[in-house]
């Protein structure tokens, strides 16, 4: 269903969607895994392309102007140019538009699609953006002061993470609300949120999800889904 290649010798793929990733590190997969969970959930035939350097690879820059992963290249063409998709939320919406024909993960009705979009956009502008900055700061060298100069920024971002966790916990406390966007099943809103709202990543930020019990329970349930387990494993193996 899938194969992996390295962008140093990039192959031309005409038959399947291509997911662009980077070599796996402890923090490289948080956004990529969102898309991979959906790919696994829908059994989408795909290629994996490991980009050697997102900053210096000009061919990748044509696919992702932000020079970041994940990005997709689809088989559709217009005027000889392949369709490219960048930013994780856009990738999720594209894949449900193309492959989720019964609306299981993207919504079956206008009501469902709107609920999913509400919570996906909240993640994109809130938790996703905050956690991304937090991870970036945590990766920076500490410098001569041992990281003390970054402490105010990290504290600010940690507080913002806790605010987002509180919003999500409140949502999941509603009667019959087992998942974030829809009550009865996971959607792309859940897939987008999970990498930044589970016990492991919260612990990295010094946050104990015991204070957000509904969110913790949701995260534990999500991690038991077969597609999630497979995607979480695969995202640690790129470029190995």
Image (tube, rainbow, N blue to C red):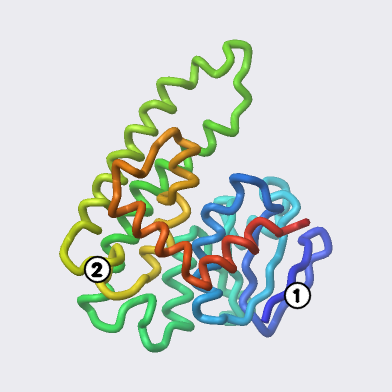
Label at residue 115: 2
The residue drawn where x is 25% and y is 82% is 109
Q: Is residue 13 left or right of residue 212?
A: right
Nearer the camera: disc 1 or disc 2: 2
N-term mark: 1 or 2: 1
Q: Provide residue 91's location: percent of width, then percent of height.
A: 49, 67
Q: Is residue 175 above or below residue 101?
A: above
Q: Image quarter for residue 179?
A: bottom left
- Point out the image quarter for the N terminus: bottom right
The residue drawn where x is 59% and y is 76% is 74
Q: Provide residue 217's location: percent of width, then percent of height.
A: 34, 57
Which is nearer the eye, 235 or 141? 235
**Residue lying farthest to the left in this orientation:** 175
Q: What residue is pinned by disc 1?
A: 12
Q: Provide residue 155's location: percent of width, then percent of height.
A: 39, 26
Q: Secondary structure at mark 2?
A: helix
**Residue lying farthest to the top in this orientation:** 145
Q: Image quarter for residue 21?
A: bottom right
Label at residue 109: none
**Within 10 angstroms of label 2, few (less than 14), some, or many (20 or more) residues?**
some
**Residue lying farthest to the bottom in this orientation:** 102
| Mark-to-mark CA distance, 1 and 2 | 37 Å
Which is nearer the eye, 37 or 118? 37
**Within 10 angstroms of label 1, few (less than 14), some, or many (20 or more) residues?**
few
Q: Is residue 151 left or right of residue 21?
A: left
The residue drawn where x is 38% and y is 33% is 158
Q: Image quarter for residue 190?
A: bottom left
- Point out the image quarter for the C terminus: bottom right
Which is nearer the eye, 215 or 90? 215
Q: Provide residue 211's location: percent of width, then percent of height.
A: 29, 41
The residue drawn where x is 28% and y is 66% is 178
């Amino acid at each position: 269903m899938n194969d992996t290649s390295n962008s140093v010798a990039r192959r031309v793929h005409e038959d399947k969607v291509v997911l662009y990733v980077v070599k796996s590190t402890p923090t490289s997969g948080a956004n990529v895994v969102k898309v991979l969970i959906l790919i696994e959930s829908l059994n989408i035939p795909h290629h994996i392309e490991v980009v050697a350097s997102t900053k210096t690879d000009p061919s990748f820059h044509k696919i992702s102007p932000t020079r970041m992963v994940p990005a997709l290249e689809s088989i559709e063409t217009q005027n000889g140019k392949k369709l490219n998709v960048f930013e994780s939320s856009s990738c999720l919406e594209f894949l449900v538009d193309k492959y989720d024909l019964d609306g299981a993960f993207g919504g079956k009705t206008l009501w469902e699609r709107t609920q999913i979009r509400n919570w996906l956009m909240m993640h994109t502008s809130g938790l996703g953006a905050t956690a991304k900055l937090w991870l970036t700061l945590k990766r920076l060298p500490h410098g001569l002061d041992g990281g003390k100069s970054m402490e105010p920024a990290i504290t600010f971002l940690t507080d913002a993470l806790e605010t987002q966790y509180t919003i999500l916990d409140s949502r999941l406390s509603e009667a019959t609300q087992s998942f974030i966007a829809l009550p009865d099943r996971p959607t792309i809103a859940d897939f987008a949120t999970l990498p930044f709202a589970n016990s492991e990543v919260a612990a990295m930020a010094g946050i104990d999800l015991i204070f957000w019990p509904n969110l913790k329970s949701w995260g534990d349930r999500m991690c038991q889904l077969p597609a999630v387990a497979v995607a979480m494993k695969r995202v640690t193996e790129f470029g190995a």
